[in-house]
Image (cartoon, coloured by chain):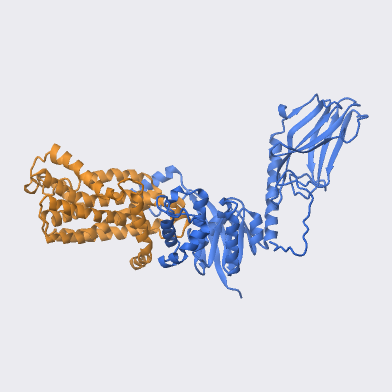
Amino acid sequence: MFIIEKIKTIYRSRLLISNLVSRELKARYRGSVLGFLWTFLNPLLLMLVYTLAFGIILKPRYPIPELKTALDYSLFLFTGLLPWIWFSSSIIEAGNVLSIHGALIKKVLFPVEVLPIMTVTANFINFLLGLPILILFFIILGHPLTWYVFFSIPVMIIQFFFTLGLAFFVAALTVHFKDVQNLIANLLTLWFFGTPIIYPFNFEPILKSKIIKTALLLNPFTHIVEGYQYSFFFGSLPHWKKLSVTFIVSLLFFLAGYYFFDRVKDTFAEEV
Amino acid sequence: MKEIAISLRNIVKAYRKYSSKHRFNTLKSAFIDGTIFRDFKPEEVFMAVNNVSLDIEKGKTVGIIGENGSGKSTLLKIIAGIIRPNRGTVITKGRISALIELGAGFHPEISGRENIFINGIILGLTKKEIKEKYDEIVRFAELEDFIEQPVKTYSSGMFMRLGFSVAINVNPDILLVDEVLAVGDASFVPKCIDKINEFKRSGKTIVFVSHDLETVARITDEAIWMKKGQIVMRGYPRQVVDAYLQDISEKEESKHKEEKKEESVPVDNKRWGDKSVEIISVKIKDLTGKEKFIYSPEDGMIVELEVKANEEKDDFGFGIGILNGEGHVVYGTNTFLENLMGKKLKKGLHKVVFKISKLNLINGFYFIDVASHSKDGTPYDYHHLLHKFRVDSNKRDVGVYRMNHQWNFDDGIEFRKY
């Protein structure tokens, strides 16, 4: 059985994965003065930029009760940005990861699937390291946090599978078609604005337009991001029905991605 | 019946070439029709390994030789499991370590120590095993003072030493070595060879791909010669190496003949003189009288000049010079220097033969200059760098020419022959 066999492969490679992930994280900021601080600074600076642009310069035309002030808005933004950074960095890096580690594929007997797994996991850990900052901001700005925060854990699992599935596709396709990388970079920008990160899902123009609303509902990342927004920002139960469907979709995505990757991986050693 | 460590059956590996147009079509149709698997079809196929079957006994050291592109490295990667063959089966017994590219997977930004751990894990060691071998790895690589530095600061020699040291300490049952020793510095290579010999003594199986035929002949039990993806010959290393060299020589000779045909028009700055005594042709032959291009240092040589005197002469002589690839004259002489005074040269065609009983030259290309000239040195016809031959020796001695020599030792000095 494909699934059982693959779970075994991943289990056998656990030491390899954990070491590659820690190397990836160590090497990322090695040589820079601030070093590991960048893990925290990067999302923080990004949040400031978006707060300035969309919270202050382009004030929302349709104010939402929960997002009255720029500070509220920045918190809301940060809640959605952190998981998005995990997602988008993973996908972009997945496009490079096979060619960067081409020597391993070509010259060493090596389970290639470890590489996309490494990328997604390394970015996941980066995301986890960003969470204390998020919580710190909630406390500083006096925004209440509830026990619903723990509902973000299943959301993370869903996101992990979804991201990994897509990472497998992107990694395998980029080996054969370099164009995929450019395509993905632009697609991700569209995807970012098509996900309720800088605006809430119940933003008036969205609710008004049926097409936009449907498109947003079909976007799995909408439900993932909403999961975080509910459990952190709004302090309420995430929409578990939508999330369950998203979970199933993510799992299917993961299996399809892994299967595709597995089918074409024998060609990597020649093409990388 | 001996135990078999590596067993290959009917291995076929074809490499595919895609054109960029094909690539675009593939991408397009892959998305439109969803035929992505079927469309990974090549336009041109290159057979890197073509139906190779091979059994290697446990404990044997086997060398694979062959020209570039003969498929030997591909075969090694197939044994290692890095490349999956299109057809055929590979069965190997025991842990394999492949020294195909040293330091593959080293990360430049992190330290040598961290890289040893991660590389060890990549090569299949557990953390505990690496800890146990860590000191040995560092000591063998001679990197005690640099091990905490990022690998990007290492010299290429240091990088290679570390890579070799990690790979060799995996303690494999089967060791695959691909040409990696070619890049090492002079002091490290013997150390690597020592280590490989140590493996050999402890009964491990070694497969060794190399262009260094001397090393192959010296350290292997058996050699395999591959040509165009197939095994041409297998057997006692010296024999296989000799057969391979012979094949290369023949190939180069025919290539040389073709080149000669092309450059038949004499170039001015390579030939001068008034041509009153013209050298029409120069033939380089072995002692049996066969025209040849490649010689061994032990061979003799005949340089045959066809001379056409356009007028009768009494002031004439012939000269010859042998120059090595750097343009230094290895030897030069002429009839005057050998106390032969021209008396009479009849008008018409003549033959002049210069015989060398033994070349005594080292490896390399050589040129022959020939001339007909007067007593005061005025050339009638001078051929400069127009005629070429090659000496192919399996010895690696150095210098300008190979002196006749022998070593003598008293009874207190013993050598191991290899």
**What chain is the blue one?**
B
Q: Quadrant of residue A5?
A: bottom left
Foreground residue among A174 and B36: A174
Q: Quadrant of residue B72?
A: bottom right
B126 to B25, vertically: above or below = below
Q: Residue A6: where, in percent of width, then height?
A: 36, 65
Counting every numbered tag in the picture gives 0
A82 to B329, vertically: above or below = below
Residue at (57, 71) in percent of width and height = B4
Q: Is residue A233 visible?
A: yes
Q: Residue A248: where, in percent of width, then height?
A: 23, 61
Left or right side of B243 for B106: left
Residue at (88, 36) in percent of width and height = B338
Q: Is residue A211 visible?
A: no
Foreground residue among B397 and A162: B397
Q: Residue furthest right?
A: B343
Q: Residue furthest bottom?
A: B1
Q: Residue furthest left?
A: A65
Chain A, colour shown: orange
Q: Residue B396: where, in percent of width, then height?
A: 69, 51
B326 to B84, vertically: above or below = above
